[in-house]
Image (cartoon, grey):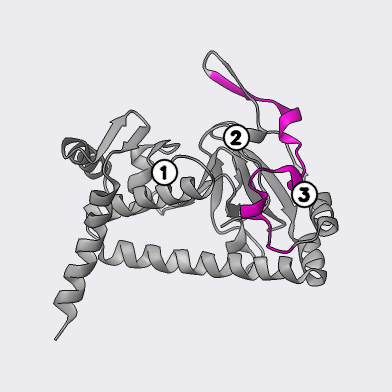
Amino acid sequence: MEFPCITRQSTELLTVPDKIVVSIDKIKVACRDCSLSTLCLPMGLRPEDVDRLDAIVKRNRPLQRGDHLFRAGEPFRNLYVVKTGAIKTFTQTSDGNEQVVGFHLHGEVLGLDAIQDGSHGCSARALETTAVCELPFERLEELASGIPSLQHQMFRLLSKEIGHEAEMMALLGRGTAEERVASFLLSLSERFKRRGFSATDFFLSMSRQEIGSYLGLALETVSRLFTRLQDDKILKVERRHVQILDIERLRSMVSQHAACEAHQASP
């Protein structure tokens, strides 16, 4: 899900011991100057409309790892776009544990699920130093009513949200543990590729436990499958640094399962 965003090219990171400091001045970049504007902004948006959209966007100080963007039950007022970093969304189970429901990377939107009820049904927390764009929803609605391409973008985002939820339900309902992990890695690969990053060499902002929570797998299962993928020379993993060595074999893990299901379902 895409919207106005700022990429690593627009943000200066200064590294000091045990801390990453993001330059505030570098974060304050207009939508029209964003290097991912062709990906995030609606096609055909006129320059003056870009300025109108940029005028309602709020850019706050970066969140640090562990900071909340919003909490479950809070009133819905804004949509949020990840400019840099990553955020996880999660709910609280009856026994007090976290159930991860999504990971959101740069250029992706949070908060769409809260439009219907007027309050957030899940919480959102930064996985690393993260900067976001804040879009007041009422002002965005008013603006979209006069800009057809922006309104179309809103509908497209909602459609993608519904489609993604359907895919996840299907994956968690039928997929094997191997297929779930393979699908997750392929999804990350494609999302990084769309934003101009490497599709086969990236860092995971989330822990193995968080991946397991998202995929409905135990931590031990996720760790075992990562080890197996390394042994099979499909992945190379060093802590959270992942290199996909054989993406076609990774894809085959998903397609073979789908073909098997289709064969079993045939008369």
Question: Mark 2 highlights which residue?
Answer: 8
In the rendered image, residue 58 lying in the magenta stretch gets the answer no
- Secondary structure found at label 2: helix
Pointer 2 and pointer 3: residues touching (CB < 8 Å)? no
Question: Mark 1 highlights which residue?
Answer: 199
Quadrant for the C terminus, please.
bottom left
Q: Start and end of the magenta stretch? A: 19-44
- Kindly identify which numbered label has been placed on residue 53: none
Q: Nearer the viewer, residue 202 or 117?
A: 202
In the rendered image, residue 33 lying in the magenta stretch gets the answer yes
Whole-percent x, y for residue 41 in the image? 68, 56
Residue drawn where x is 47% and y is 47% of the image: 193
Label 3 neighbourhood size at 10 Å, few (<14), some (14-19), many (20+)? many
- Secondary structure found at label 3: loop
Residue 77 placement, left or right of 179:
right
Residue drawn where x is 71% and y is 34% of the image: 27
- Say which label, 2 or 1, has the lower sequence index: 2
Residue drawn where x is 47% and y is 50% of the image: 191
Rendered image quadrant of residue 145 = bottom right
- Kindly identify which numbered label has been placed on residue 57: 3
Q: How far apart are labels 2 and 1 at the CA level?
A: 16 Å
Q: Nearer the viewer, residue 229 or 113?
A: 229
- Say which label, 2 or 3, has the lower sequence index: 2
Pointer 1 and pointer 3: residues touching (CB < 8 Å)? no
Disc 2 vs disc 3: which is toward the camera?
Answer: 2
Q: How far apart are labels 2 and 3 at the CA level?
A: 19 Å
* In the rendered image, the vertical position of residue 61 relative to residue 153, given as above or below: above
Disc 1 vs disc 3: which is toward the camera?
Answer: 1
